[in-house]
Amino acid sequence: MGKNDRKGGHRNGGWGTSTSAMTVVGNEILCASNDGEFYRFGWTLGDIESPRFRDSFANGFGDTMNDKSASKVIGINGRGSLVAIVLAKGFMGVRERSGWTVRQRFAAPGVHDAACSADDRLWLATADAVREVDVTGHATGRTALDPGTPSAIAVSRQGELVVCDDGSRQQIRFCAIAGPDVR
């Protein structure tokens, strides 16, 4: 990885690495690279010129999997105290934001996106469903009603589950997830 310092006619500065996924959580930007590393940057909200490289660390998921391609990060989302990491070939990883230690790994067949809620629950998207699990990967029984073909998900600051439906409806749905029911 090399830093581009706006030399050679480049308009923008940046870090030369192939990034497969990224998330912004508070004053941190976390990028997952194709070389199995996470790169962490600090930044000031509203100041596009402020990002500064903080550190990098190993993905941490390849060491326990026999298949290196299974540890490739395809999605990442952070909120509250957790960062949910969607790994290729049906695996999920969860890291603590404080210290970035690996908290959990679990099988999640077909999952292609994840979102963290403020209460440290995870929402997982597959080709035709969005379901909630706890941090260990156990289903809570809560699912988004009629999500269509979910292509991406997030949890808004207001605590709503946001589902991008890439199916025939081509719409973005907002679901209330506070309380026992998903509406």
Image: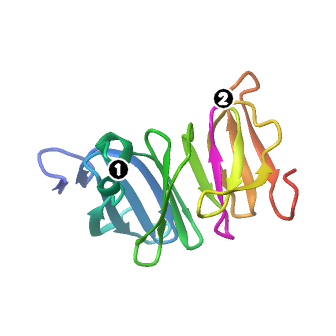
**Residue 3, image x and y in percent?**
18, 56
Q: Position of residue 89 (x, y in %)?
A: 45, 38
According to the picture, the residue beneath numbered tag 2 turns out to be: 166
Q: Does the image show residue 50?
A: no
Residue 136 at what x, y percent from top left? 59, 62
Tell me, for residue 65, which label it has, or none.
Answer: 1
Query: 10 Å neighbourhood of mark 2: few (<14), some, or many (≥20)?
Result: some
Q: Residue furthest top?
A: 168
Residue 51: numbered disc:
none
Residue at image x 84%, y 52%? 182
Q: CA distance from mark 2 to mark 1?
A: 32 Å
Q: Is residue 39 magenta?
A: no
* Among the two numbered marks 2 and 1 on one chain, the one whose residue lies closer to the N terminus: 1
Q: Is residue 15 above or below residue 168?
A: below
Main SS type for the magenta part? loop
Q: Is 118 contained in the magenta span?
A: yes
- Which quarter of the figure has residue 139? bottom right
